[in-house]
C-alpha cells in the first residue's frame, strides 16, 4: 500500500496552504488529525467534547490523563479564558514559541473537563512549528495534542510510522495525516505547573530547569 496517497503533503509553503482545506474539514467533522510539531508527530483536533472523545477513543487514553492544547500566540490564552500568573508571563516572554508546556488555571467556560489535569489546570504550548501554527490560525482556535504512537512504542517522527500503526483508522477516515517530513529526534517539551504560588516542573524536557530559573528563580523541581 502506497503511503503517499494516504497522507497529505505538509512541507513547502504551497503544500501547507493546499493542506489547510482538508485538514480543517477533518477538524470540523470532529475527527482526528495527525500532524508534525517541533518535537514529534502528534494527534489532535478540536477542543469540543465530541472531538476530544474521538481522540480518546483512537488513543485508548486512560481516565485522568489529559491532552495538552497547542496555540499559535499568547492571545489564544485569553480566548481560552485561561489565567497567566505573572511568573508564567516571564516564561512566555523568553521561551514561547517553543518546547515549553505551561499548565495554567482557568478555562472554566471554554475548556472541557476532560482536558484538565489532576492539578486542575490546562496544559498549553505555543508551537514553534510554522506550518502547525498556520493551521491553528486558520482554524481560529487551539488544537488538542498528544503523541502519535501506540502504548510502548516511541512517538512517531515520520508520517509513515503513523500510517503503519494506524492504517485502519486512516482507511476509515477517522484519522488523516499531514506529512511534514522526517523530524529530528528531540526531547519532549518541558512541562511546568503554573497553578500554584510557585511554578513547578512536572516533566523534565527540552528546556532545562536551570535555564527556566534564569527567568523565574522560584521554580521548584528538576534540580
Image (cartoon, helix red, strand yellow):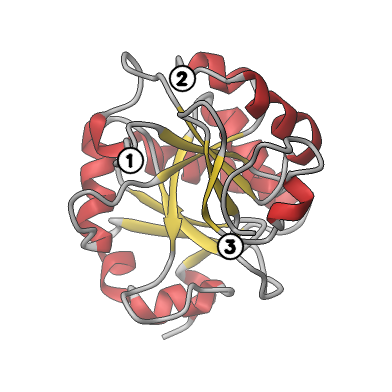
Q: Secondary structure at mark 2?
A: loop
Give the alpha-carbon distance from disc 2 to disc 1, as whole Å. Answer: 16 Å
**x, y percentage for residue 172?**
25, 63
Residue 81 percent location from the top left of the image = 45, 14
Q: Which mark is residue 80?
A: 2
Which residue is at 32% across, 37% downward? 115
Which mark is in front, 3 or 2? Answer: 3
Q: Are marks 2 and 1 in contact (CB under 8 Å)?
A: no
Q: Residue furthest bottom?
A: 1
Q: Quadrant of the N terminus?
A: bottom left
Secondary structure of the residue carrying tag 1 is: loop
Say the numbered circle drawn on residue 85.
none
Q: Nearer the viewer, residue 178 or 76?
A: 76
Where does the C terminus fall, quadrant-wise?
Answer: bottom right
Give the CA distance from mark 3 to mark 2.
Answer: 24 Å
Q: Looking at the picture, does residue 97 appear above or below residue 184?
A: above
CB of mark 3 within 8 Å of CB of mark 2?
no
**Numbered label attached to residue 117:** 1
Other-residue count near label 2 (Cα within 10 Å), few / some / many at <14 / 14–19 / ≥20: some
Is residue 116 placed above or below 213 in the rendered structure?
Answer: above
Disc nearer the start of the sequence (1/3): 1
Q: Secondary structure at mark 3?
A: loop
Residue hosting label 3: 188
Q: Earlier in the sequence, mark 2 or mark 1?
A: 2
- Mark 1: few/some/many CA within 10 Å (<14, 14-19, 20+): some
Q: Quadrant of residue 134?
A: top right
Amino acid at each position: 500500500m502506497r503511503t503517499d496517497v494516504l497522507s497529505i503533503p505538509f512541507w513547502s509553503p504551497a503544500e501547507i496552504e493546499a493542506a489547510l482545506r482538508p485538514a480543517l474539514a477533518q477538524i470540523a467533522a470532529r475527527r482526528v488529525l495527525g500532524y508534525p510539531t517541533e518535537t514529534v508527530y502528534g494527534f489532535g483536533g478540536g477542543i469540543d467534547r465530541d472531538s476530544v472523545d474521538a481522540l480518546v477513543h483512537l488513543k485508548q487514553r486512560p481516565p485522568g490523563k489529559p491532552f495538552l492544547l497547542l496555540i499559535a500566540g499568547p492571545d489564544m490564552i485569553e480566548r481560552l479564558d485561561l489565567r497567566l500568573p505573572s511568573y508564567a508571563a516571564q516564561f512566555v516572554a523568553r521561551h514561547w514559541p517553543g518546547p515549553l508546556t505551561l499548565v495554567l488555571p482557568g478555562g472554566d467556560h471554554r475548556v472541557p473537563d476532560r482536558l484538565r489535569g489532576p492539578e486542575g489546570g490546562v496544559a498549553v504550548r505555543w508551537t514553534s512549528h510554522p506550518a502547525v501554527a498556520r493551521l491553528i490560525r486558520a482554524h481560529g482556535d487551539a488544537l488538542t495534542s498528544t503523541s502519535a504512537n501506540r502504548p510502548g512504542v516511541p512517538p512517531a517522527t515520520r508520517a509513515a510510522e503513523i500510517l503503519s500503526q494506524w492504517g485502519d483508522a486512516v482507511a476509515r477516515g477517522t484519522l488523516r495525516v499531514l506529512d511534514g517530513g522526517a523530524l529530528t529526534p528531540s526531547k519532549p517539551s518541558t512541562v511546568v505547573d503554573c497553578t500554584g504560588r510557585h511554578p513547578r516542573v512536572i516533566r523534565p524536557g527540552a528546556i532545562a530547569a536551570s535555564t527556566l530559573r534564569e527567568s523565574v528563580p522560584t521554580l521548584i523541581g528538576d534540580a
